[in-house]
Image: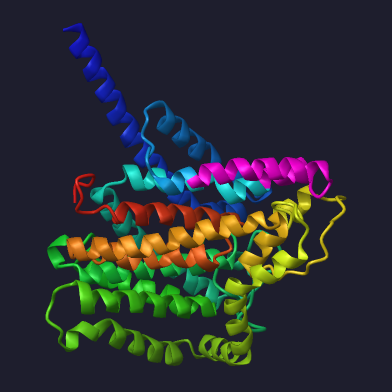
Amino acid sequence: MAKLTSIQELVAQKNFALLRSRQLIEIIYWLVILEGAFRKWILVFLAKPLFFVRDPFLLYLYYLTYKYNLQPRKDAFLRAALVLSGVFLALIIAQSFSERISIATGIYGWRMYFLYIPLAFIAGQVLQASDLKRITKTTLLSSIPMAAIALLQYRSPHDAFINRVVEGDAFRYSADLARISGTFSFTQGHMYYCHTLLCFLLATWLLVPKNRPLDGRLLYVATIATCINVVLDGNRAVLVAAITTLAFSLVYRLFLSGSKITWRTFSPELIFVLGGLAYAFLFSDAYEALSSRTVENADEGNGRLAISFTGMFGAVTKTALLGNGIGASSSGGAQLSMGIQRRSTVVINEDIETSRIVVECGPLGILYIAFRYALGIKLMIDGFIASRRTRNPLPFILSNYPAMMLFVGSITFNGNTNGYAWIFVGFSLAANKLGTDRSNA
Protein backbone atom coordinates (compact mmCIF):
# COMPACT_ATOMS: atom_id res chain seq x y z
CA MET A 1 0.00 0.00 0.00
CA ALA A 2 2.83 2.39 0.88
CA LYS A 3 4.50 1.66 -2.47
CA LEU A 4 1.25 2.37 -4.33
CA THR A 5 0.82 5.64 -2.45
CA SER A 6 4.39 6.62 -3.35
CA ILE A 7 3.75 5.93 -7.03
CA GLN A 8 0.54 7.97 -6.92
CA GLU A 9 2.42 10.86 -5.34
CA LEU A 10 5.07 10.73 -8.06
CA VAL A 11 2.41 10.73 -10.77
CA ALA A 12 0.64 13.65 -9.09
CA GLN A 13 3.92 15.58 -8.85
CA LYS A 14 4.72 14.98 -12.51
CA ASN A 15 1.22 16.03 -13.58
CA PHE A 16 1.61 19.18 -11.50
CA ALA A 17 4.99 19.84 -13.13
CA LEU A 18 3.45 19.39 -16.61
CA LEU A 19 0.63 21.79 -15.80
CA ARG A 20 3.02 24.35 -14.30
CA SER A 21 5.36 24.01 -17.31
CA ARG A 22 2.52 24.81 -19.71
CA GLN A 23 1.56 27.79 -17.57
CA LEU A 24 5.15 29.06 -17.55
CA ILE A 25 5.40 28.75 -21.33
CA GLU A 26 2.27 30.86 -21.75
CA ILE A 27 3.52 33.41 -19.21
CA ILE A 28 6.76 33.76 -21.16
CA TYR A 29 4.77 34.11 -24.38
CA TRP A 30 2.57 36.90 -23.06
CA LEU A 31 5.53 38.66 -21.50
CA VAL A 32 7.13 38.75 -24.96
CA ILE A 33 4.03 40.60 -26.19
CA LEU A 34 3.45 42.84 -23.16
CA GLU A 35 6.87 43.56 -21.64
CA GLY A 36 7.40 46.49 -24.02
CA ALA A 37 4.34 48.25 -22.60
CA PHE A 38 5.96 48.23 -19.16
CA ARG A 39 9.35 49.24 -20.48
CA LYS A 40 8.20 52.26 -22.49
CA TRP A 41 4.99 53.43 -20.78
CA ILE A 42 4.60 52.17 -17.20
CA LEU A 43 7.97 51.38 -15.58
CA VAL A 44 10.22 53.48 -17.79
CA PHE A 45 12.87 53.83 -15.05
CA LEU A 46 13.19 50.00 -15.06
CA ALA A 47 13.39 49.65 -18.84
CA LYS A 48 16.82 47.97 -18.86
CA PRO A 49 16.22 45.47 -16.00
CA LEU A 50 12.82 44.57 -17.49
CA PHE A 51 14.66 43.35 -20.57
CA PHE A 52 15.39 40.24 -18.50
CA VAL A 53 11.91 39.91 -16.93
CA ARG A 54 11.23 36.62 -18.76
CA ASP A 55 14.43 34.93 -17.66
CA PRO A 56 13.36 33.94 -14.09
CA PHE A 57 10.27 32.21 -15.48
CA LEU A 58 12.44 30.50 -18.09
CA LEU A 59 14.95 29.26 -15.52
CA TYR A 60 12.14 27.96 -13.30
CA LEU A 61 10.76 26.10 -16.32
CA TYR A 62 14.19 24.55 -16.93
CA TYR A 63 14.38 23.53 -13.26
CA LEU A 64 10.99 21.78 -13.41
CA THR A 65 11.92 20.13 -16.69
CA TYR A 66 15.16 18.76 -15.27
CA LYS A 67 13.68 17.71 -11.90
CA TYR A 68 10.72 15.83 -13.38
CA ASN A 69 12.45 14.65 -16.56
CA LEU A 70 10.05 16.40 -18.92
CA GLN A 71 12.56 17.27 -21.64
CA PRO A 72 12.65 15.38 -24.94
CA ARG A 73 15.42 12.85 -24.45
CA LYS A 74 16.06 11.74 -28.02
CA ASP A 75 15.77 14.94 -30.03
CA ALA A 76 18.85 15.28 -32.23
CA PHE A 77 18.36 19.03 -32.69
CA LEU A 78 18.23 19.67 -28.95
CA ARG A 79 21.38 17.60 -28.43
CA ALA A 80 23.09 19.51 -31.24
CA ALA A 81 22.08 22.82 -29.65
CA LEU A 82 23.47 21.77 -26.27
CA VAL A 83 26.76 20.69 -27.85
CA LEU A 84 26.98 23.97 -29.78
CA SER A 85 26.26 25.95 -26.61
CA GLY A 86 29.22 24.26 -24.91
CA VAL A 87 31.51 24.94 -27.86
CA PHE A 88 30.48 28.59 -27.91
CA LEU A 89 31.13 28.91 -24.18
CA ALA A 90 34.70 27.84 -24.87
CA LEU A 91 34.84 30.39 -27.70
CA ILE A 92 33.64 33.13 -25.34
CA ILE A 93 36.43 32.31 -22.89
CA ALA A 94 39.00 32.47 -25.71
CA GLN A 95 37.57 35.77 -26.95
CA SER A 96 37.65 37.31 -23.47
CA PHE A 97 41.29 36.27 -22.95
CA SER A 98 42.22 37.80 -26.30
CA GLU A 99 40.41 41.01 -25.25
CA ARG A 100 37.91 40.94 -28.08
CA ILE A 101 35.04 41.23 -25.61
CA SER A 102 34.43 41.51 -21.90
CA ILE A 103 33.21 38.35 -20.22
CA ALA A 104 29.92 40.17 -19.48
CA THR A 105 29.38 40.76 -23.19
CA GLY A 106 30.16 37.10 -23.90
CA ILE A 107 27.59 35.91 -21.37
CA TYR A 108 25.03 38.31 -22.81
CA GLY A 109 25.81 37.09 -26.31
CA TRP A 110 25.54 33.44 -25.22
CA ARG A 111 22.11 34.25 -23.79
CA MET A 112 21.00 35.67 -27.13
CA TYR A 113 22.33 32.66 -29.03
CA PHE A 114 21.36 29.74 -26.81
CA LEU A 115 19.38 30.43 -23.62
CA TYR A 116 15.95 30.22 -25.23
CA ILE A 117 16.61 27.25 -27.53
CA PRO A 118 15.64 24.56 -24.96
CA LEU A 119 12.36 26.44 -24.40
CA ALA A 120 11.35 25.57 -27.96
CA PHE A 121 11.90 21.84 -27.50
CA ILE A 122 10.27 21.77 -24.06
CA ALA A 123 7.21 23.56 -25.49
CA GLY A 124 7.12 21.05 -28.33
CA GLN A 125 7.19 18.23 -25.78
CA VAL A 126 4.66 19.40 -23.17
CA LEU A 127 2.11 21.48 -25.11
CA GLN A 128 -0.95 19.62 -26.35
CA ALA A 129 -3.78 20.35 -28.76
CA SER A 130 -5.89 22.02 -26.08
CA ASP A 131 -3.00 24.36 -25.24
CA LEU A 132 -2.47 25.33 -28.88
CA LYS A 133 -6.20 25.94 -29.28
CA ARG A 134 -6.24 28.25 -26.26
CA ILE A 135 -3.09 30.08 -27.38
CA THR A 136 -4.57 30.58 -30.86
CA LYS A 137 -7.83 31.91 -29.41
CA THR A 138 -6.25 34.32 -26.93
CA THR A 139 -3.75 35.59 -29.52
CA LEU A 140 -6.53 36.34 -31.99
CA LEU A 141 -8.53 38.08 -29.26
CA SER A 142 -5.47 40.17 -28.36
CA SER A 143 -5.55 41.58 -31.90
CA ILE A 144 -8.61 43.65 -30.93
CA PRO A 145 -7.01 45.87 -28.24
CA MET A 146 -3.75 45.86 -30.25
CA ALA A 147 -5.65 47.25 -33.25
CA ALA A 148 -7.02 50.04 -31.05
CA ILE A 149 -3.46 50.89 -29.94
CA ALA A 150 -2.26 50.77 -33.56
CA LEU A 151 -5.00 53.19 -34.66
CA LEU A 152 -4.13 55.57 -31.82
CA GLN A 153 -0.42 55.42 -32.71
CA TYR A 154 -1.23 55.99 -36.37
CA ARG A 155 -3.37 59.04 -35.61
CA SER A 156 -0.92 60.54 -33.08
CA PRO A 157 2.22 62.63 -33.79
CA HIS A 158 5.43 60.66 -33.96
CA ASP A 159 6.65 62.29 -30.73
CA ALA A 160 3.45 61.52 -28.78
CA PHE A 161 3.64 59.45 -25.59
CA ILE A 162 1.77 56.56 -27.22
CA ASN A 163 4.48 56.34 -29.90
CA ARG A 164 7.39 55.96 -27.50
CA VAL A 165 9.94 53.21 -28.02
CA VAL A 166 12.46 52.06 -25.43
CA GLU A 167 15.49 53.81 -26.90
CA GLY A 168 15.73 56.65 -29.37
CA ASP A 169 12.94 58.20 -31.43
CA ALA A 170 10.02 56.34 -32.94
CA PHE A 171 10.58 55.12 -36.48
CA ARG A 172 8.49 56.92 -39.05
CA TYR A 173 6.44 56.17 -42.16
CA SER A 174 7.22 59.72 -43.22
CA ALA A 175 7.92 63.10 -41.62
CA ASP A 176 4.47 63.17 -40.02
CA LEU A 177 3.61 59.51 -39.41
CA ALA A 178 5.15 57.20 -36.82
CA ARG A 179 5.60 53.49 -37.48
CA ILE A 180 3.40 51.24 -35.35
CA SER A 181 5.02 49.49 -32.40
CA GLY A 182 1.91 48.36 -30.48
CA THR A 183 2.84 47.14 -27.01
CA PHE A 184 6.33 46.17 -28.12
CA SER A 185 9.62 47.85 -27.25
CA PHE A 186 10.43 48.42 -30.91
CA THR A 187 8.51 48.45 -34.19
CA GLN A 188 10.03 45.10 -35.19
CA GLY A 189 8.03 43.33 -32.47
CA HIS A 190 4.70 44.45 -33.90
CA MET A 191 5.79 43.26 -37.34
CA TYR A 192 6.41 39.74 -36.01
CA TYR A 193 3.15 39.86 -34.06
CA CYS A 194 1.28 40.61 -37.29
CA HIS A 195 2.89 37.63 -39.01
CA THR A 196 1.81 35.26 -36.25
CA LEU A 197 -1.71 36.74 -36.26
CA LEU A 198 -1.96 35.96 -39.96
CA CYS A 199 -0.83 32.37 -39.37
CA PHE A 200 -3.36 31.79 -36.59
CA LEU A 201 -6.16 33.58 -38.45
CA LEU A 202 -5.81 31.73 -41.75
CA ALA A 203 -5.51 28.38 -39.98
CA THR A 204 -8.66 29.16 -37.96
CA TRP A 205 -10.72 30.12 -41.00
CA LEU A 206 -9.65 26.95 -42.85
CA LEU A 207 -10.80 24.69 -40.02
CA VAL A 208 -14.36 23.38 -40.02
CA PRO A 209 -16.48 25.66 -37.79
CA LYS A 210 -16.94 23.13 -34.98
CA ASN A 211 -13.15 22.81 -34.56
CA ARG A 212 -12.28 26.51 -34.65
CA PRO A 213 -10.72 27.97 -31.49
CA LEU A 214 -12.66 31.17 -32.19
CA ASP A 215 -15.94 31.39 -34.10
CA GLY A 216 -18.98 33.55 -34.65
CA ARG A 217 -18.89 37.33 -34.35
CA LEU A 218 -15.65 37.33 -32.38
CA LEU A 219 -13.85 35.70 -35.31
CA TYR A 220 -15.08 38.43 -37.65
CA VAL A 221 -14.02 41.13 -35.20
CA ALA A 222 -10.59 39.48 -34.78
CA THR A 223 -10.28 39.29 -38.59
CA ILE A 224 -10.94 43.01 -38.96
CA ALA A 225 -8.57 43.75 -36.08
CA THR A 226 -5.84 41.63 -37.67
CA CYS A 227 -6.27 43.49 -40.96
CA ILE A 228 -5.96 46.84 -39.15
CA ASN A 229 -2.76 45.71 -37.43
CA VAL A 230 -1.29 44.47 -40.70
CA VAL A 231 -2.11 47.48 -42.88
CA LEU A 232 -0.99 50.01 -40.28
CA ASP A 233 2.28 48.30 -39.40
CA GLY A 234 4.19 50.21 -42.05
CA ASN A 235 6.93 47.61 -42.53
CA ARG A 236 7.47 46.15 -45.96
CA ALA A 237 8.36 42.83 -44.35
CA VAL A 238 4.72 42.46 -43.24
CA LEU A 239 3.71 42.37 -46.91
CA VAL A 240 6.26 39.59 -47.47
CA ALA A 241 4.91 37.79 -44.40
CA ALA A 242 1.33 38.07 -45.68
CA ILE A 243 2.28 36.71 -49.11
CA THR A 244 4.27 33.86 -47.55
CA THR A 245 1.44 32.90 -45.20
CA LEU A 246 -1.05 33.01 -48.08
CA ALA A 247 1.26 30.78 -50.13
CA PHE A 248 1.48 28.19 -47.34
CA SER A 249 -2.28 28.27 -46.86
CA LEU A 250 -2.79 27.87 -50.63
CA VAL A 251 -0.57 24.77 -50.65
CA TYR A 252 -2.73 23.39 -47.84
CA ARG A 253 -5.96 24.18 -49.68
CA LEU A 254 -4.79 22.69 -52.98
CA PHE A 255 -2.84 19.64 -51.84
CA LEU A 256 -3.61 18.77 -48.22
CA SER A 257 -7.19 19.59 -47.27
CA GLY A 258 -8.91 16.94 -49.39
CA SER A 259 -11.72 19.41 -50.20
CA LYS A 260 -13.16 20.02 -53.62
CA ILE A 261 -11.60 23.02 -55.35
CA THR A 262 -14.16 25.79 -56.04
CA TRP A 263 -14.04 29.57 -56.22
CA ARG A 264 -14.29 29.58 -52.41
CA THR A 265 -10.90 27.87 -52.29
CA PHE A 266 -9.31 31.17 -53.27
CA SER A 267 -11.35 33.41 -50.96
CA PRO A 268 -8.29 34.34 -48.80
CA GLU A 269 -6.56 35.76 -51.87
CA LEU A 270 -9.75 37.69 -52.76
CA ILE A 271 -9.91 39.11 -49.24
CA PHE A 272 -6.22 40.03 -49.50
CA VAL A 273 -6.88 42.04 -52.67
CA LEU A 274 -9.95 43.73 -51.20
CA GLY A 275 -7.98 44.52 -48.04
CA GLY A 276 -5.26 46.12 -50.17
CA LEU A 277 -7.84 48.31 -51.91
CA ALA A 278 -9.40 49.31 -48.58
CA TYR A 279 -5.91 50.15 -47.28
CA ALA A 280 -5.26 52.45 -50.24
CA PHE A 281 -8.50 54.39 -49.67
CA LEU A 282 -8.93 54.38 -45.87
CA PHE A 283 -5.27 54.97 -44.95
CA SER A 284 -4.07 56.76 -48.05
CA ASP A 285 -1.23 58.68 -46.37
CA ALA A 286 0.27 55.49 -44.90
CA TYR A 287 -0.26 53.67 -48.21
CA GLU A 288 1.53 56.38 -50.18
CA ALA A 289 4.45 56.47 -47.72
CA LEU A 290 4.82 52.69 -47.79
CA SER A 291 4.48 52.52 -51.59
CA SER A 292 7.15 55.16 -52.16
CA ARG A 293 9.54 53.44 -49.74
CA THR A 294 8.89 50.09 -51.42
CA VAL A 295 9.62 51.47 -54.91
CA GLU A 296 12.67 53.50 -53.82
CA ASN A 297 14.24 50.63 -51.86
CA ALA A 298 13.19 47.64 -53.95
CA ASP A 299 16.73 46.89 -55.12
CA GLU A 300 18.07 47.34 -51.60
CA GLY A 301 15.47 44.94 -50.19
CA ASN A 302 16.22 42.29 -52.81
CA GLY A 303 19.94 42.68 -52.21
CA ARG A 304 19.49 42.41 -48.45
CA LEU A 305 17.54 39.15 -48.84
CA ALA A 306 20.21 37.69 -51.10
CA ILE A 307 23.01 38.74 -48.74
CA SER A 308 21.16 37.06 -45.86
CA PHE A 309 21.96 33.74 -47.51
CA THR A 310 25.30 34.52 -49.16
CA GLY A 311 26.93 37.28 -47.09
CA MET A 312 28.19 34.88 -44.43
CA PHE A 313 30.57 33.26 -46.91
CA GLY A 314 32.20 36.57 -47.74
CA ALA A 315 32.37 37.50 -44.08
CA VAL A 316 34.06 34.25 -43.05
CA THR A 317 37.03 34.95 -45.36
CA LYS A 318 37.56 38.40 -43.79
CA THR A 319 36.97 37.58 -40.12
CA ALA A 320 39.57 36.38 -37.64
CA LEU A 321 39.40 32.77 -36.46
CA LEU A 322 38.01 33.79 -33.08
CA GLY A 323 35.60 36.34 -34.52
CA ASN A 324 34.87 39.81 -33.23
CA GLY A 325 33.16 38.75 -30.01
CA ILE A 326 29.83 37.02 -29.37
CA GLY A 327 27.17 39.63 -28.64
CA ALA A 328 29.47 42.55 -29.49
CA SER A 329 27.35 43.67 -32.46
CA SER A 330 24.12 43.99 -30.48
CA SER A 331 23.25 47.21 -28.70
CA GLY A 332 23.28 45.57 -25.27
CA GLY A 333 26.55 43.78 -25.93
CA ALA A 334 28.19 46.95 -27.25
CA GLN A 335 27.36 48.77 -24.02
CA LEU A 336 28.89 45.96 -21.97
CA SER A 337 32.06 46.01 -24.09
CA MET A 338 32.83 49.71 -23.78
CA GLY A 339 36.57 50.23 -24.04
CA ILE A 340 37.36 46.84 -25.57
CA GLN A 341 39.54 47.07 -28.68
CA ARG A 342 38.01 45.38 -31.73
CA ARG A 343 40.19 42.98 -33.73
CA SER A 344 37.96 42.80 -36.82
CA THR A 345 37.72 45.34 -39.64
CA VAL A 346 34.70 43.69 -41.26
CA VAL A 347 31.87 46.15 -41.78
CA ILE A 348 28.42 44.61 -41.36
CA ASN A 349 24.83 45.67 -41.77
CA GLU A 350 22.90 45.17 -38.53
CA ASP A 351 19.94 43.85 -40.55
CA ILE A 352 21.95 40.95 -42.00
CA GLU A 353 21.81 38.33 -39.28
CA THR A 354 24.02 35.68 -40.87
CA SER A 355 26.90 38.07 -41.64
CA ARG A 356 26.74 39.45 -38.12
CA ILE A 357 26.92 35.94 -36.63
CA VAL A 358 30.03 35.10 -38.64
CA VAL A 359 31.69 38.40 -37.71
CA GLU A 360 30.97 37.75 -34.03
CA CYS A 361 31.87 34.05 -33.95
CA GLY A 362 34.28 33.50 -36.82
CA PRO A 363 33.97 30.26 -38.84
CA LEU A 364 32.11 28.60 -35.94
CA GLY A 365 29.21 30.91 -36.77
CA ILE A 366 28.57 28.82 -39.89
CA LEU A 367 27.70 25.85 -37.65
CA TYR A 368 25.14 27.91 -35.74
CA ILE A 369 23.60 29.16 -38.99
CA ALA A 370 23.50 25.62 -40.42
CA PHE A 371 21.72 24.46 -37.25
CA ARG A 372 19.06 27.13 -37.71
CA TYR A 373 18.61 26.40 -41.41
CA ALA A 374 18.26 22.66 -40.81
CA LEU A 375 15.73 23.21 -38.04
CA GLY A 376 13.69 25.59 -40.20
CA ILE A 377 13.56 23.07 -43.05
CA LYS A 378 12.55 20.31 -40.64
CA LEU A 379 9.70 22.42 -39.22
CA MET A 380 8.25 22.97 -42.69
CA ILE A 381 8.57 19.34 -43.74
CA ASP A 382 7.08 18.04 -40.49
CA GLY A 383 4.35 20.68 -40.70
CA PHE A 384 3.42 19.50 -44.20
CA ILE A 385 3.30 15.88 -43.01
CA ALA A 386 1.26 16.78 -39.91
CA SER A 387 -1.29 18.79 -41.89
CA ARG A 388 -1.64 15.95 -44.39
CA ARG A 389 -2.06 13.45 -41.53
CA THR A 390 -4.65 15.46 -39.60
CA ARG A 391 -6.31 17.63 -42.28
CA ASN A 392 -5.54 20.45 -39.89
CA PRO A 393 -4.01 23.56 -41.51
CA LEU A 394 -2.27 24.84 -38.37
CA PRO A 395 0.97 22.78 -38.47
CA PHE A 396 1.96 23.69 -42.03
CA ILE A 397 0.74 27.30 -42.05
CA LEU A 398 2.27 28.02 -38.65
CA SER A 399 5.65 26.55 -39.67
CA ASN A 400 6.26 29.40 -42.12
CA TYR A 401 6.77 31.96 -39.34
CA PRO A 402 9.48 30.21 -37.26
CA ALA A 403 11.15 28.96 -40.44
CA MET A 404 11.39 32.51 -41.78
CA MET A 405 12.78 33.66 -38.44
CA LEU A 406 15.37 30.88 -38.40
CA PHE A 407 16.43 31.74 -41.95
CA VAL A 408 16.62 35.57 -41.84
CA GLY A 409 15.30 36.81 -38.46
CA SER A 410 17.49 38.97 -36.21
CA ILE A 411 17.27 36.44 -33.39
CA THR A 412 20.70 37.13 -31.90
CA PHE A 413 20.40 40.92 -32.12
CA ASN A 414 17.06 41.82 -30.55
CA GLY A 415 15.77 40.39 -27.26
CA ASN A 416 12.12 40.59 -28.24
CA THR A 417 12.81 38.87 -31.54
CA ASN A 418 14.82 36.23 -29.72
CA GLY A 419 11.98 35.24 -27.41
CA TYR A 420 9.35 35.45 -30.13
CA ALA A 421 11.27 33.27 -32.54
CA TRP A 422 12.13 30.41 -30.19
CA ILE A 423 8.73 30.21 -28.52
CA PHE A 424 7.10 29.90 -31.94
CA VAL A 425 9.57 27.19 -32.87
CA GLY A 426 8.11 25.44 -29.82
CA PHE A 427 4.51 26.09 -30.91
CA SER A 428 5.36 24.71 -34.34
CA LEU A 429 7.00 21.60 -32.86
CA ALA A 430 3.90 21.05 -30.72
CA ALA A 431 1.57 21.52 -33.72
CA ASN A 432 3.61 19.06 -35.77
CA LYS A 433 2.85 16.24 -33.33
CA LEU A 434 -0.94 16.68 -33.65
CA GLY A 435 -2.61 13.37 -34.39
CA THR A 436 0.20 11.27 -32.98
CA ASP A 437 0.12 9.14 -29.85
CA ARG A 438 1.86 12.00 -27.98
CA SER A 439 -1.02 14.41 -28.59
CA ASN A 440 -4.63 14.54 -27.42
CA ALA A 441 -5.73 16.10 -30.71
Q: Position of residue 367 (x, y in %)?
A: 58, 56
Vertical placement of residue 71 versus 370, above or below: above
- The quarter of the rendered structure image containing the N terminus is top left
Residue at left offset 84%, top offset 56%: 342
Magenta span: helix, strand or loop, mainly?
helix
Left or right of 345, for residue 34: left
Magenta run includes residue 106: yes
Vertical placement of residue 106 versus 291, above or below: above
Residue at left offset 51%, top offset 53%: 419
Magenta run includes residue 228: no
- Asked where in the image residue 64 lies, by quadrant, the reply is top left
Q: Position of residue 416 (x, y in %)?
A: 55, 56
Vertical placement of residue 418 versus 197, above or below: above
- Asked where in the image residue 69 lies, by quadrant, the reply is top left
Q: Residues in magenta?
A: 80-108
Left or right of 215, for residue 103: right
Vertical placement of residue 386 versus 93, above or below: below
Whether residue 146 is visible, yes or no, is no
Residue at left offset 41%, top offset 26%: 67
Q: Position of residue 201 (x, y in %)?
A: 31, 69
Query: How many numbered discs sit on the rendered protein?
Result: 0
Judge by depth and name the residue closer to the eye, 338 or 219. 338
